[in-house]
Amino acid sequence: MTMPFFTKLTLAFAATALLAVAPAAAASKEKINRKSDRAVSEFRETITGADAVLNKAAGYLVFPSIKKAGIGIGGEHGKGALRVGGKTVAYYSTTSASIGFQLGAQARRQIIVFLDQKALDKFRASQGWEIGVDASVAVVTIDAGGAVDATQLNQPIVAFVFDGKGLMYNLSLEGSKINQIKRD
Protein backbone atom coordinates (compact mmCIF):
# COMPACT_ATOMS: atom_id res chain seq x y z
CA MET A 1 0.00 0.00 0.00
CA THR A 2 1.44 3.39 -0.96
CA MET A 3 1.23 6.52 1.14
CA PRO A 4 -0.71 9.51 -0.18
CA PHE A 5 1.45 12.37 -1.44
CA PHE A 6 0.37 14.71 1.40
CA THR A 7 1.39 12.13 4.02
CA LYS A 8 4.80 11.72 2.38
CA LEU A 9 5.23 15.48 2.19
CA THR A 10 4.25 15.91 5.86
CA LEU A 11 6.64 13.16 6.99
CA ALA A 12 9.48 14.63 4.91
CA PHE A 13 8.91 18.09 6.38
CA ALA A 14 8.69 16.67 9.92
CA ALA A 15 11.97 14.82 9.49
CA THR A 16 13.60 18.01 8.21
CA ALA A 17 12.14 20.02 11.10
CA LEU A 18 13.39 17.52 13.67
CA LEU A 19 16.88 17.65 12.19
CA ALA A 20 16.77 21.44 12.21
CA VAL A 21 15.97 21.63 15.92
CA ALA A 22 18.55 19.05 16.99
CA PRO A 23 21.95 20.58 17.72
CA ALA A 24 24.61 20.03 15.09
CA ALA A 25 27.25 19.32 17.72
CA ALA A 26 27.10 18.47 21.39
CA ALA A 27 27.16 21.54 23.61
CA SER A 28 30.00 21.69 26.09
CA LYS A 29 29.39 22.08 29.81
CA GLU A 30 30.92 25.55 29.64
CA LYS A 31 28.64 26.60 26.80
CA ILE A 32 25.54 25.26 28.60
CA ASN A 33 26.60 27.09 31.78
CA ARG A 34 27.25 30.35 29.92
CA LYS A 35 23.89 30.25 28.15
CA SER A 36 22.12 29.19 31.37
CA ASP A 37 23.72 32.11 33.25
CA ARG A 38 22.39 34.51 30.60
CA ALA A 39 18.91 32.96 30.73
CA VAL A 40 18.76 33.20 34.54
CA SER A 41 20.03 36.80 34.43
CA GLU A 42 17.42 37.72 31.82
CA PHE A 43 14.71 35.98 33.88
CA ARG A 44 15.74 37.90 37.01
CA GLU A 45 16.00 41.23 35.16
CA THR A 46 12.80 41.07 33.13
CA ILE A 47 10.37 39.17 35.37
CA THR A 48 9.31 40.94 38.54
CA GLY A 49 9.34 38.43 41.39
CA ALA A 50 11.79 36.02 39.72
CA ASP A 51 14.36 36.44 42.52
CA ALA A 52 11.80 35.43 45.14
CA VAL A 53 10.83 32.34 43.14
CA LEU A 54 14.44 31.19 42.59
CA ASN A 55 15.36 31.94 46.22
CA LYS A 56 12.41 29.82 47.38
CA ALA A 57 13.36 26.89 45.10
CA ALA A 58 15.00 23.65 46.19
CA GLY A 59 16.52 23.69 42.70
CA TYR A 60 15.78 24.78 39.15
CA LEU A 61 16.42 23.39 35.70
CA VAL A 62 17.42 26.01 33.13
CA PHE A 63 16.95 25.38 29.41
CA PRO A 64 18.43 28.50 27.77
CA SER A 65 17.16 27.55 24.31
CA ILE A 66 14.54 25.01 23.32
CA LYS A 67 13.90 24.94 19.60
CA LYS A 68 10.57 23.67 18.30
CA ALA A 69 9.29 23.25 14.74
CA GLY A 70 6.34 21.54 13.18
CA ILE A 71 3.76 21.23 10.47
CA GLY A 72 1.27 18.60 11.56
CA ILE A 73 4.14 16.63 13.12
CA GLY A 74 6.58 18.52 15.29
CA GLY A 75 9.54 18.16 17.55
CA GLU A 76 11.58 20.12 20.03
CA HIS A 77 14.98 19.84 21.68
CA GLY A 78 17.14 21.72 24.15
CA LYS A 79 19.96 21.28 26.65
CA GLY A 80 20.27 22.81 30.08
CA ALA A 81 21.66 22.79 33.58
CA LEU A 82 20.18 21.80 36.94
CA ARG A 83 21.07 24.33 39.60
CA VAL A 84 20.92 23.69 43.34
CA GLY A 85 21.97 26.51 45.63
CA GLY A 86 22.73 28.55 42.50
CA LYS A 87 25.42 26.05 41.36
CA THR A 88 25.19 23.63 38.42
CA VAL A 89 25.00 20.04 39.66
CA ALA A 90 24.03 18.18 36.45
CA TYR A 91 23.19 18.63 32.77
CA TYR A 92 19.97 17.59 31.05
CA SER A 93 18.34 17.47 27.63
CA THR A 94 14.66 17.82 26.82
CA THR A 95 12.93 16.42 23.76
CA SER A 96 9.38 15.90 22.63
CA ALA A 97 7.42 15.10 19.52
CA SER A 98 3.82 15.88 18.73
CA ILE A 99 1.17 15.24 16.13
CA GLY A 100 -1.77 17.56 15.59
CA PHE A 101 -2.61 21.10 14.55
CA GLN A 102 0.66 23.02 14.62
CA LEU A 103 2.47 25.15 12.16
CA GLY A 104 5.62 27.17 12.64
CA ALA A 105 8.84 27.32 14.56
CA GLN A 106 9.97 28.96 17.75
CA ALA A 107 12.81 29.20 20.22
CA ARG A 108 12.11 29.76 23.87
CA ARG A 109 13.78 29.76 27.24
CA GLN A 110 12.39 27.63 30.00
CA ILE A 111 13.09 27.35 33.71
CA ILE A 112 11.54 24.47 35.65
CA VAL A 113 11.48 25.34 39.34
CA PHE A 114 11.31 22.65 42.01
CA LEU A 115 9.64 24.34 44.97
CA ASP A 116 9.52 21.09 46.95
CA GLN A 117 12.63 19.13 47.99
CA LYS A 118 10.86 15.76 47.56
CA ALA A 119 9.94 16.67 43.96
CA LEU A 120 13.56 17.62 43.25
CA ASP A 121 14.84 14.40 44.84
CA LYS A 122 12.41 12.29 42.78
CA PHE A 123 13.50 14.11 39.60
CA ARG A 124 17.20 13.58 40.33
CA ALA A 125 16.69 9.87 41.12
CA SER A 126 14.80 9.23 37.86
CA GLN A 127 16.31 7.50 34.85
CA GLY A 128 14.39 9.76 32.49
CA TRP A 129 11.52 12.00 33.49
CA GLU A 130 8.40 12.81 31.51
CA ILE A 131 6.23 15.82 32.26
CA GLY A 132 2.66 14.72 32.78
CA VAL A 133 3.65 11.11 33.54
CA ASP A 134 6.29 11.35 36.26
CA ALA A 135 5.10 14.72 37.57
CA SER A 136 2.65 17.51 36.90
CA VAL A 137 4.21 20.84 36.08
CA ALA A 138 2.24 24.08 36.29
CA VAL A 139 3.26 26.22 33.30
CA VAL A 140 3.48 30.00 33.61
CA THR A 141 4.08 31.82 30.31
CA ILE A 142 5.79 35.16 30.86
CA ASP A 143 6.41 37.96 28.34
CA ALA A 144 8.93 40.76 28.86
CA GLY A 145 7.82 43.00 31.71
CA GLY A 146 5.71 40.22 33.25
CA ALA A 147 5.44 39.60 36.96
CA VAL A 148 5.07 36.56 39.19
CA ASP A 149 4.02 36.36 42.82
CA ALA A 150 6.02 33.63 44.59
CA THR A 151 3.44 33.43 47.36
CA GLN A 152 0.80 32.35 44.82
CA LEU A 153 2.80 29.37 43.58
CA ASN A 154 1.29 26.38 45.34
CA GLN A 155 2.49 23.54 43.09
CA PRO A 156 5.65 21.53 43.85
CA ILE A 157 6.96 22.13 40.30
CA VAL A 158 6.36 25.17 38.10
CA ALA A 159 7.80 26.08 34.72
CA PHE A 160 8.38 29.54 33.31
CA VAL A 161 8.43 29.93 29.55
CA PHE A 162 9.76 33.26 28.33
CA ASP A 163 11.53 35.06 25.49
CA GLY A 164 9.37 33.43 22.82
CA LYS A 165 10.58 33.95 19.27
CA GLY A 166 8.28 33.04 16.42
CA LEU A 167 4.82 31.56 16.53
CA MET A 168 3.75 28.06 17.52
CA TYR A 169 0.09 27.26 18.09
CA ASN A 170 0.71 24.36 20.48
CA LEU A 171 2.72 25.43 23.55
CA SER A 172 2.59 22.62 26.09
CA LEU A 173 5.24 20.86 28.12
CA GLU A 174 3.09 17.73 28.46
CA GLY A 175 5.04 14.75 27.15
CA SER A 176 8.43 16.46 27.25
CA LYS A 177 11.09 13.91 28.17
CA ILE A 178 14.00 15.10 30.26
CA ASN A 179 17.15 12.99 30.56
CA GLN A 180 20.42 13.57 32.29
CA ILE A 181 23.39 14.11 29.98
CA LYS A 182 26.25 11.88 31.06
CA ARG A 183 29.59 13.57 30.33
CA ASP A 184 33.17 13.37 31.55
Image (spheres, grey):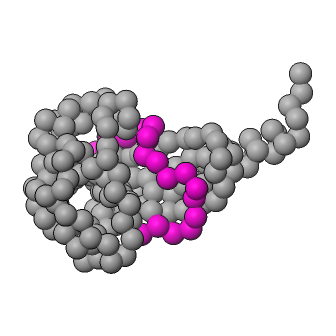
Height in image: 151 above or below 2?
Answer: below
Residue depicted at 22% across the width and 73% down the height: 48
Height in image: 183 above or below 83?
Answer: above
Q: Is residue 22 magenta?
A: no
On-image quarter of the N terminus: top right
The boundaries of the magenta stretch are 163-184
Res 130 quadrant in image:
top left
Residue depicted at 45% across the width and 37% down the height: 175
Res 163 quadrant in image:
bottom left
On-image quarter of the C terminus: top left
Height in image: 91 above or below 146?
Answer: above
In the foreground, 9 or 24: 9
- Percent coordinates x, y for residue 64 in the rendering: 37, 62
* Residue 20 shows in the view: no
In the foreground, 171 or 90: 171
Residue depicted at 24% across the width and 65% down the height: 148
Going by the image, does 180 lie left or right of 17? left
Q: How many marks?
A: 0
Going by the image, does 17 lie left or right of 58? right
- Percent coordinates x, y for residue 109 in the rendering: 39, 62
Residue lying farthest top? 1
* Residue 121 shows in the view: yes
- Percent coordinates x, y for residue 43 in the rendering: 28, 70
Residue depicted at 38% across the width and 35% down the height: 132
Q: Is residue 175 magenta?
A: yes
